Amino acid sequence: MKDKLIQFMMGRYGTDTLNKHILYTVLVLIVLNLLLNNRVLYFLSYALIAVDLFRTFSKNVTARSAENAKYEEFMRPVFDQVKVMQKNFSDKDHKYFVCKNCHKMVRVPKGKGKIEVTCPRCGHHFDARS
């Protein structure tokens, strides 16, 4: 059975970041639909499931990869902020920032007040509170 599934998925796109986020959105819509009993949310959730299945089983790998790359580039500021929040929560001795120019994460010591941070990659200067 496992071999048949592997053979079926051979040459198909599979899952990626965009597919995972579509499924998370579907789960949120289903919960909202249970609370609000709204027909629009019901049909929207099924439409998103259809899009997700289409993307998963698509044999046009190039187009699906391009869609995912565009989505990840569009969502990069959000992903960067989530990483910074995780680092700031876990590291008590340093504060983390994202360079607005090159998107590199920059670490500075905590408790220094208002400082000028220089990005080690691109040399961009910005003011921040540590």
Image (tube, grey):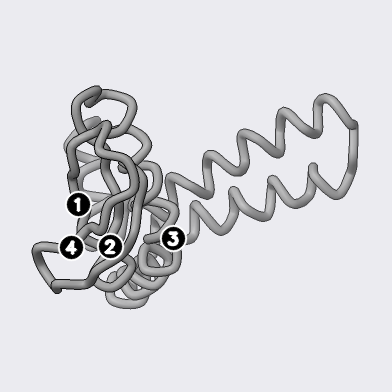
Please tell me which of labels 2 and 3 falls first in the chain.
3
**Separation (CA) of disc 4 from disc 3:** 24 Å
Which mark is nearer the camera, 3 or 1? 1
**Separation (CA) of disc 2 from disc 3:** 16 Å
**Separation (CA) of disc 2 from disc 4:** 9 Å
**Separation (CA) of disc 3 from disc 1:** 19 Å
Please tell me which of labels 4 and 3 falls first in the chain.
3
Q: Which residue is mark 3?
A: 75
Image: 12 above or below 102? above
Task: Pinpoint residue 76: horizontal percent, then vertical percent.
Answer: 37, 61
Tags 1 and 2 in contact by the CB under 8 Å rule?
yes
* Residue at position x 59%, y 48% in the image: 49
**Mark 1 burial class by Cα count in 10 Å: few <14, some 14-19, many 20+:** some
**Which residue is at the front of the view, 9 or 119?**
119
Which mark is nearer the camera, 2 or 3? 2
Q: Is residue 90 left or right of residue 128?
A: left
Q: Which residue is mark 2?
A: 99
Mark identifier at residue 106: 1
Q: Is residue 79 left or right of residue 93?
A: right
Identify the amino acid type marked 1: Val
Task: Pinpoint residue 114: horizontal percent, then vertical percent.
Answer: 34, 48
**Which residue is at the front of the view, 11 or 123?**
123
Q: Which residue is mark 4?
A: 118
Q: Helix, strand, or loop for circle 3?
A: helix
Mark identifier at residue 116: none
Tags 4 and 1 in contact by the CB under 8 Å rule?
no
* Residue at position x 24%, y 33% in the image: 110
Identify the amino acid type marked 3: Met
Which mark is nearer the camera, 4 or 1? 4
